[in-house]
Image (cartoon, helix red, strand yellow):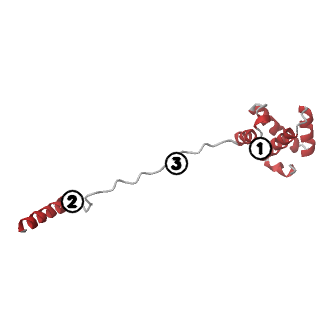
Amino acid sequence: MKKLFAVASAVLLLVTLTGCSSSGTHAIDPSPMPTYTPDPQPTYTNEEIFVKLVRAQYPYYAGLYSDSELLNIAQSSCTYFRDGGDFETLAYSLVTSFDNTDPDFFGFVGFTIGSGVEALCPQYSYLITN
């Protein structure tokens, strides 16, 4: 038994001496925590947000127009409101110029005007009716 006690004491002494160093570190140092850096979010211009929004809300009708045509509707709406025009007249003139009587198309025109104004010239958003 004395021999077993002596071996166990020697092993314990050896573990103590090799497990601890003079720098005060532990025998098992945890690896440093990895840092998480999120992927940078893409930044979109107001024009890109407007086009994505219209395409998401009215995919069929927005698909009939290019991005530049949709932006032209929004920019023309801003110019129209700047010059004193009202929403109802603008919407009516756009609907009749496209010669489409589908009620969904009316919604598309109104949504395109409204979201275009919000994106490009929000100072005229008070002219958009609900």
Front position in the image: 60 or 115: 60
Residue 27 x/y as whole percent:
25, 58
Q: Earlier in the sequence, mark 1 or mark 3?
A: 3
Q: Disc 2 or disc 1, which is closer to the eye?
A: 2
Query: Callout 2: few (<14), some (14-19), or many (20+) C-alpha neighbours within 10 Å?
Result: few
Above or below for 117 versus 71: below
- Dot label at residue 120: 1
Q: Amino acid at mark 3?
A: Pro
Marks 1 & 3, CB-CB < 8 Å contact: no
Q: Disc 1 or disc 3, which is closer to the eye?
A: 3
User: SS of the residue at dot 3?
Assistant: loop
Q: Does any portion of residue 84 appear in the rendered image?
A: no
| Quarter containing the N terminus | bottom left
Above or below for 45 versus 18: above
User: SS of the residue at dot 1?
Assistant: helix
Please tell me how many numbered marks the rendered image carries: 3
Q: Amino acid at mark 1?
A: Leu
Which residue is at the far left? 3
Residue 110 x/y as whole percent:
85, 43
Q: Which residue is mark 2?
A: 19
Q: Earlier in the sequence, mark 2 or mark 3?
A: 2
Q: Which residue is mark 3?
A: 38
Q: Disc 2 or disc 3, which is closer to the eye?
A: 2
Residue at point 81% right, 43% down?
111
Taking 5 as reference, is 71 left or right?
right
Q: Does any portion of residue 49 appear in the rendered image?
A: yes
Q: Amino acid at mark 2?
A: Gly
